[in-house]
């Protein structure tokens, strides 16, 4: 009996593993935001971020660059959810967390667009759990 | 003749009546002698006196009566940027630098507005409703366009300068402006550098011998130019000299950057105001680290002159008389840019300075020779030879790209812009501190024009193992011996400069909205109150109508130094996300 239960558990675990393994994880290369959203994000960026991170996103003073090697170094292999949470917790530096969640999502869409990740057909949401399932991968898989 | 002109004069005066209300009516020009030796009741320079003591000889408020302090008046400040203000007070008038270039003149006894200079419409903020009261008649000057893209440091305007009949300020888009001290009218406005290259000011100028001297910041991006300090004619703004804070290729010291081209010699920002010794006729100015922060990222192991140094400059020509580089080839963002405090210790005409590492440097201010270094014992990055001042990095504390390391302090520093104060009564420096450490991995920066910057760092701030879980400390350090007289730890970081007074009372404040009055000798807290938001900026004390006031700025912003540490390490401590203000305290009428 107990052996049968153990056997079932093994089968179940294996099936679960397959189910998880079989689901292709999404990444920033899968069109996770829209062009319109990135455009909204561009406006918000100019208002609240450009003062420190500069118009070209390369950073100023102690604010790091949000593009190129710098972005790849800081965020590769983390999730868009990680980036969203950190941005909302610490930015803008004089008023952390002061923007609507949707605006943080728009800002991330703009930053993703400036890093060359493609736009898609659905907008990036503000649900952290969902965003955590989108990986930031610096280079497109061959 | 006199009789015939009198009625005409009366008509003119009547028609200008409201305008006169908005002026500083009895303004006596500020002389060189006044700046060098301010009246006891005035606060005429950034740290009151040229020696940057942050000390006032006023003694109406004493150890015995400070418990009676109460709010005399308060004033909301521009709330669209970062606050780290130092008010100036001259002859009963306060000149207040607000964020984003706004400058106001207030009656220092009441807070009533006398004039306001506003460089342009502040972003993302509705216009204030126009009231029917007196203030609607006060000219709201808007005489130069707001910064287009330049907004270095989210509009921090740390200090102003005063000389003659002018108030001098610097802007976050790299201009220096001069206002009429009587009316706030813009007299001149010079563009010192191109804000599109990242340049801007966060600190205001000092004035020495008719020269307005200011240190540039925002110098971290790669471009065919380097950071500098410049001197300007106070009458016209004309640039008289410009001294690079970076040794260029081919110049003396140029080889300390290895073979890096001019474009890749970044940093050495001069973002804290200088001090001045009239006897030596030398201005002392600090410089920040090289950029990018880590040697491996910027591509040279060299000393990188004149980064992280104290420079002694001739105020008339800008010529560098000596330099002392505190940490050659600094590599973990440990600034030594901060205030130079000039104190004579016996016969030693000294300059004291403390950087992020919490090491107190004592130099001979005539020659720049090393005298002594006192390590508070919290940092774990370098060792300093007690005889030569030579710095050696400890094992494992020089970052390699992509390799995690840990160090104390974090890049926020134990000591930062929060200036120390010196009391000649106790022969002690009062040091506002921020105790924490960091686990960090440094990453690469783009090696192209417009790239560079600080370089990216994956970091996690941690509490300091010696701090009992506390994040702040305010300590008294005896300068002759380097002995700690007392220390007061707080759950949140110290967040203001220190203010020492002849009444034996020292003032400071923390991130968690506390303002403290300490007994300068014992460290006992004699009085405390809570502010609308973090205590943040440079408290001062002054006389108005013969009465002593203490002004404490409160505010938010300020970059990593104020916004990362407390939310990450003490999330239970909260402050409002608004509330830039000045709070002014005094004893009740009749108290002694």
Image (spheres, coloured by chain):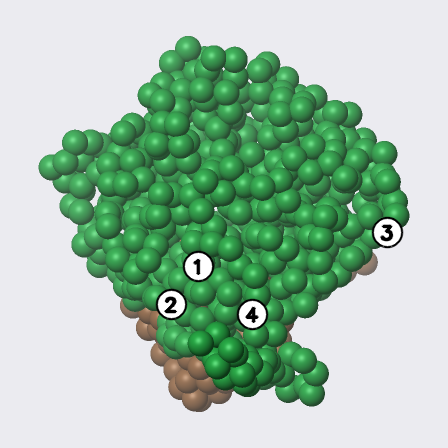
Chain colours: A brown, B green
Q: Which of the two discs, 1 and 3, labels the residue nearer the N terminus?
A: 1
Q: Position of residue A66 (x, y in %)?
A: 40, 63
Residue B187 is labelled as 2
Labels 4 and 3: the sequence-earlier one:
4
Who is closer to the viewer here, B264 or B22?
B22
Q: Which residue is the site of mark 1?
A: B166
For mark 4, name the chain. B
Q: Disc 2 to disc 1, how far (Cα)?
A: 8 Å
Q: Are marks 2 and 1 in contact (CB under 8 Å)?
A: yes
Q: Chain ID for label 3?
A: B
Residue B77 in sight: yes
Left or right: where B483 falls relative to A136: right
- Lower sequence index among marks 4 and 2: 4
Residue B233 at x, y percent in the picture = 30, 53
Marked residue chain, label 1: B
User: Which is nearer the N-term, disc 2 or disc 3?
Assistant: 2
In the picture of the structure, the residue carrying the numbered disc 4 is B23
């Amino acid at each position: 009996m107990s052996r049968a239960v153990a056997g079932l558990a093994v089968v179940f675990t294996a099936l679960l593993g397959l189910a998880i393994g079989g689901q292709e994880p999404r990444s920033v290369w899968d069109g996770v935001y829209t062009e319109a959203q990135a455009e909204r994000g561009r406006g918000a960026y100019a208002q609240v971020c450009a003062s420190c991170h500069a118009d070209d996103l390369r950073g100023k003073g102690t604010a790091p660059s949000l593009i190129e090697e710098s972005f790849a170094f800081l965020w590769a292999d983390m999730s868009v959810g990680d980036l969203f949470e950190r941005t909302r917790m610490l930015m803008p530096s004089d008023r952390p967390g002061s923007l609507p969640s949707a605006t943080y999502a728009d800002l991330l869409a703009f930053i993703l667009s400036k890093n060359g990740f493609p736009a898609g057909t659905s907008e990036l949401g503000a649900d952290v759990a969902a965003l955590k399932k989108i990986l930031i991968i610096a280079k497109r898989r061959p | 003749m006199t009789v015939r002109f009198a009625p005409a004069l009366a008509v003119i005066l009547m028609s200008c009546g409201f305008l006169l209300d908005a002026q500083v009516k009895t303004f006596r020009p500020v002389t060189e002698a006044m700046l060098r030796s301010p009246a006891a009741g005035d606060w005429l320079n950034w740290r009151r006196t040229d020696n940057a003591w942050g000390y006032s000889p006023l003694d109406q408020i004493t150890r015995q009566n400070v418990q009676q302090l109460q709010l005399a008046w308060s004033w909301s400040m521009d709330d669209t940027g970062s606050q780290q203000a130092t008010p100036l007070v001259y002859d009963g008038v306060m000149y207040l630098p607000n964020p984003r270039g706004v400058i106001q003149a207030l009656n220092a006894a009441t807070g009533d507005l006398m004039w306001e200079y506003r460089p342009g419409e502040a972003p993302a903020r509705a216009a204030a409703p126009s009231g029917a009261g007196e203030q609607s008649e006060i000219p709201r000057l808007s005489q130069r366009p707001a910064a287009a893209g330049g907004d270095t440091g989210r509009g921090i305007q740390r200090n102003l300068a005063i000389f003659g009949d002018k108030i001098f300020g610097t802007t976050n888009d790299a201009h220096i402006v001069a206002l009429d001290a009587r009316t706030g009218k813009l007299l001149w406005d010079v563009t010192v550098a191109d804000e599109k290259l990242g340049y801007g000011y966060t600190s205001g100028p000092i004035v020495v011998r008719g020269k307005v001297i200011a240190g540039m910041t925002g110098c971290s991006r790669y471009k065919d130019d380097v950071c500098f300090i410049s001197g300007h004619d106070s009458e016209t703004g004309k640039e008289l000299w410009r001294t690079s804070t970076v040794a260029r290729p081919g110049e003396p010291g140029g080889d300390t950057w290895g073979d890096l081209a001019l474009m890749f010699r970044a940093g050495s920002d001069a973002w804290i105001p200088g001090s001045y010794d009239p006897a030596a006729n030398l201005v002392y100015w600090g410089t920040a680290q090289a950029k990018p922060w880590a040697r491996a990222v910027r591509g040279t192991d060299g000393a990188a002159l004149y980064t992280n140094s104290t420079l002694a400059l001739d105020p008339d020509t800008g010529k560098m008389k000596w330099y002392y580089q505190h940490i050659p080839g600094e590599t973990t963002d440990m600034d030594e840019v901060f205030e130079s405090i000039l104190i004579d210790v016996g016969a030693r005409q000294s300059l004291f300075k403390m950087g992020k590492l919490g090491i107190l440097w004592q130099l001979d201010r005539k020659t720049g020779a090393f005298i002594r270094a006192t390590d508070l014992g919290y940092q774990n990055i370098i060792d300093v030879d007690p005889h030569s001042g030579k710095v050696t990095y400890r094992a494992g504390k020089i970052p390699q790209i992509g390799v995690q390391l840990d160090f104390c302090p974090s890049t926020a520093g134990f000591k930062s812009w929060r200036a120390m104060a010196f009391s000649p009564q106790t022969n002690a420096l009062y040091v506002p501190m921020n105790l924490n450490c960091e686990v960090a991995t440094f990453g690469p920066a783009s090696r192209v024009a417009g790239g560079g910057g600080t370089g990216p760092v994956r970091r996690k701030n941690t509490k300091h193992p010696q701090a009992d879980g506390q994040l702040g400390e305010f300590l008294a350090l005896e300068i002759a011996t380097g002995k700690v007289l007392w220390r007061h730890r707080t759950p949140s970081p110290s967040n203001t400069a220190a203010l020492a007074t002849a009444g034996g009372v020292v003032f400071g404040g923390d991130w968690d909205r506390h303002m403290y009055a300490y007994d300068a000798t014992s460290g006992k807290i004699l009085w405390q109150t809570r502010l609308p938001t973090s205590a943040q900026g440079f408290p001062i004390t002054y006389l108005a109508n013969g009465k002593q006031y203490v002004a404490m700025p409160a505010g938010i912003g300020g970059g990593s130094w104020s916004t990362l540490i407390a939310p990450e390490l003490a999330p239970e401590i909260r402050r409002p996300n608004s509330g830039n203000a000045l709070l002014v305290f005094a004893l009740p009428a009749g108290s002694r």
